[in-house]
Image (cartoon, grey):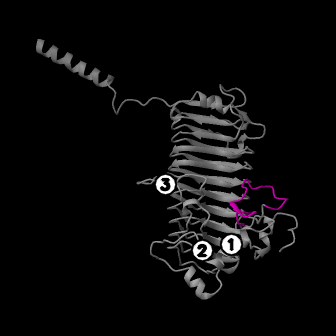
Amino acid sequence: MRRGVGLGIALIALVVGMVAAPGASAAKPKQQELFVCKHGCKYRTIQDAVDRSKRDATINVAPGKYREGVIVKGHKHDGLTIQGTGKNPKKVILEGKNARNENGVAQNGIEGIKVDGLRMLNMWARNYATNGFFIHECADYLMKDLYASFNRSYGMYAFDCTGGRITKSVGWGHGDSAFYIGATPPQKKPDWTSLDHLDGHENVLGYSGTNSRYVKITKSDFYNNGVGVVPNTLDSEPYEPTADGKITKNNIFWNNFNYFMSASRVETVSGGLGQIGDQTINFPTGVGIVLLGADGWKVTKNKIFGNFKWGAAAISDPFNEGDDAVSRNNQFVDNQMGRNGTDTNAVDFFVDGSGGGNCFSGNVSSTFDADSPAAAAALYPGCPQPAGGGTGTGDPAQFGKLASYVLSDPPETQQCSWTEHAHPKFKKFKPLEVPGVIPECP
């Protein structure tokens, strides 16, 4: 009996110990959930809720207009979700007009600084002094079901981040671009960034990415911008050049937005790409894709049509310090150009003849900007090509064409060299025309 009693006590102790000990079967702590609304909630501003949030918290924002600039700073907020609870993004508005925060005039609708896994969902940021949604020094963010409009620079902007996704979002009215990935650190095992199911229109640039890497842009519409999609290399940001990206299965069309016209609702934030003497080098307009100083970008299976200057261009920047902005190893493969001849680009492809390893294959209905068939064969070789070398100095004739275009003075006269025509209907979209009279063409 003594032995049986002792064994029973031991078994009870063991069971109690197993229940008390933490393990895989232990209940997970309930995640923090905070609510923001104009009346009747604990928090009246998104910033107040952020300040009291912990890791993996969720902030639910009720429909309304929030005139503030939200700052989320530090890894103590890792995994934070900020989401609008309206039926669509237009119900929860971050309003930049007269918005202020602890730093004075609010520069951004939401800014994330050194926060990993930040999720921003189902909101609209508009009229901010700089950007709509901005995150930097981060990893694995998500921007989904967002609208961004008429912010001075960018709509949705990630800088010095690894991984992440921007999806099912719309951006318009920006002085630079609707969507921007910049300064991606080189990685041995790349964590790719996905941009998909996007709509970028009426911007200086639909997408731009200075010194970006490991970016896939897919299943999106870029239209009615000055240029649709522009990966680029500049000295102004770290991690040159832009490299190893993919632009695939997008519609890139009607990018003929002459924002230099005085009647344009959008004014470029850029003072130009540089100077040649006393002349300003401006971004080109009327172009679907520009790869500027890009290395190893793959442009495949896109529909590129109705752009009045070039469908796609690959060029270098010979003025870049260290000659980092050289066009190398870019592939243009299996793109549908000109919508079967019904909505052509003025010319499908342009290169300046710099760099090396660039190639063109399987593009339907291709035309090439070159002075002769022999020049076209040399400038636009088929794929594959040996790895490229070369420098940022291109073919003199091609460089002259590019220079005369981007140095147009006044810049709105770039339109003088467009090949314009009426666009047949395409889905729900309508072409954008800026009213007004172009100054006398040279």
Whether label 3 touches label 2, CB < 8 Å: no
Front-most of 291 and 61? 291
**Would you identify the image quadrant in which residue 343 lies?**
bottom right
Residue with the mark numbered 3: 192
Mark 2, residues whose alpha carbon is within 10 Å: few (<14), some, or many (≥20)?
Answer: many
Residue depicted at x 57% and y 48%: 159
For residue 394, the mark is 2
- Spatial CA distance of label 1 from label 2 is 10 Å
Whether label 1 touches label 2, CB < 8 Å: yes
Question: Looking at the image, is mark 3 or mark 2 earlier in the sequence?
Answer: 3
Mark 1, residues whose alpha carbon is within 10 Å: few (<14), some, or many (≥20)?
Answer: some
- Spatial CA distance of label 1 from label 3 is 32 Å
For residue 402, the mark is 1
Q: Secondary structure at mark 1?
A: helix
Residue 233 is situated, as x and y percent measured from the top left of the image, at 58, 60
Q: Secondary structure at mark 2?
A: loop
Residue depicted at x 81% and y 55%: 265
What amino acid is labelled 1 in the image?
Answer: Leu
Residue depicted at x 74% and y 73%: 424
Determine whether, in the image, residue 22 is placed left or right of residue 213.
Answer: left
> What type of secondary structure mainly makes up the magenta span?
loop
Question: Looking at the image, is mark 1 or mark 2 earlier in the sequence?
Answer: 2
Front-most of 100 and 370? 370
Does 64 lie within the magenta span?
Answer: no
Residue depicted at x 45% and y 29%: 29
What amino acid is labelled 3 in the image?
Answer: Trp
User: In the image, which is nearer the foreground, mark 1 or mark 3?
Assistant: 1
Segment colored magenta: 260-285
Classify 100 as above or below 8: below
Front-most of 392 and 176? 392
